[in-house]
Amino acid sequence: MENKNAELEVYNLRTVIVSLLLGFFGVGLLVVSYIFQKYDYDPLFIFAIGSIGTTILTVGIISLLYEVLLRRSFINVTQQSIQRIFLDEKQKSNELLKIEKAKIEKYVEDEKIKLFDYYEKEKIGIEKNLRGIIEEAIPPKYSNIKRVGIVDTYDFLEMERLRQKIEKLENTEFKILKIYTPTLNLLESTIINSIENRNVAFRINLLNPCCEEAIDKRAKSLKDYDKDQIKEEIIKNLRRCKSIFKRIEKKENFKVRLYDSFISVPIYGYGTSYIMGLYLHNRLSEEGVQIKVSGIGSVLYKRVDEHFENIWANAKDVNLEDEDFLKKISL
């Protein structure tokens, strides 16, 4: 670009010099014709020289004026016109590129949607086929287990797993139906956090420590516990419930009741699931096999849920706001 500008400047300078030379030459011819008039030269010759000088002078002046005044303006106008045309073409090209890009993006998006729909249809078809194959391969007895609502079993009640379940609950209930639960003290902080921060409501149903007959039956099935020890464990649970009640703001989310009849199935319930234990001989329920039941529509879930609600409906409320509530517990 700089080389072109240099060539342009040299060319302009040469034009100016030529114009000036023509002007001087024209003036010189006019001077000569004027001098020749004083002598007896041929008038036609003098006229011819004067005319040529006038013409050359006029050409020089016009060339000089064009170069100095008009040529640069003409070049600028021409350059501006070329730049404007270039910018217009560039803008048109950009608009065309945008249009083509939008078309390509729309095409790609449409293809992605088609591919996703195809994948989903194929996935659903594969899942149906796979489900059918699995259902045909599973023996009838396992299908019956699933149908009634049993989804899993555990060798014993894993405290950490139970804690994790509670920590994931939100805006729901957690239910306990036990003679007493040795896990309550270990779950205290988890229970409080769930009530205060995730609006979980707890309903705890324990055996009335004054229910001598039920306590006597359970004590006879445990070689390491007598009646007084079982009563003491229930009292410990109630004291723990009192501790939890004092520490929470949402007191309506923590309710405790005492039932009077012997139960054979202790349970922990959360969301749409229950974990059932068994009161076996010489074994705490947490130490035995645990059966997980899930699915509101399943037969066993309905039975277990009715089991809890019936006992809850007939149990006595524990007034945890009363400091002397333990002294007032009676049959």
Image: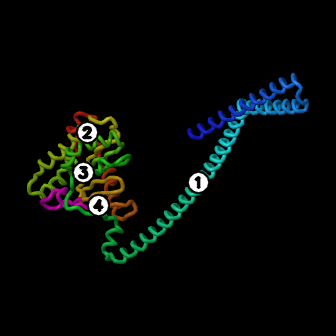
Name the residue located 34 percent from the left edge and 77 percent from the top edge: 137
Q: CA distance from mark 2 to mark 1?
A: 62 Å
Q: CA distance from mark 4 to mark 3?
A: 26 Å
Q: Of the residues shown, which amino acid type is indicated by label 3?
A: Asp
Q: Which mark is residue 102?
A: 1
Q: Of the residues shown, which amino acid type is indicated by label 2?
A: Ile
Instruction: State which region is magenta.
Output: 277-291
Residue indicated by mark 4: 292
* Proximity of marks 4 and 2: CB atoms separated by less than 8 Å: no
Q: Residue furthest left?
A: 224
Q: Residues within 10 Å of mark 3 (few under 14, many from 20)?
A: many
Q: Is residue 252 above or below residue 153?
A: above
Between 110 and 97, the one nearer to me in the picture = 97
Q: Of the residues shown, which amino acid type is indicated by label 1?
A: Ala
Between 275 and 152, the one nearer to me in the picture = 152
Q: CA distance from mark 4 to mark 1?
A: 55 Å
Q: CA distance from mark 4 to mark 2?
A: 27 Å
Between 22 and 120, the one nearer to me in the picture = 22
Q: Of label 4 and label 3, which has the lower sequence position?
A: 3
* Proximity of marks 3 and 2: CB atoms separated by less than 8 Å: no
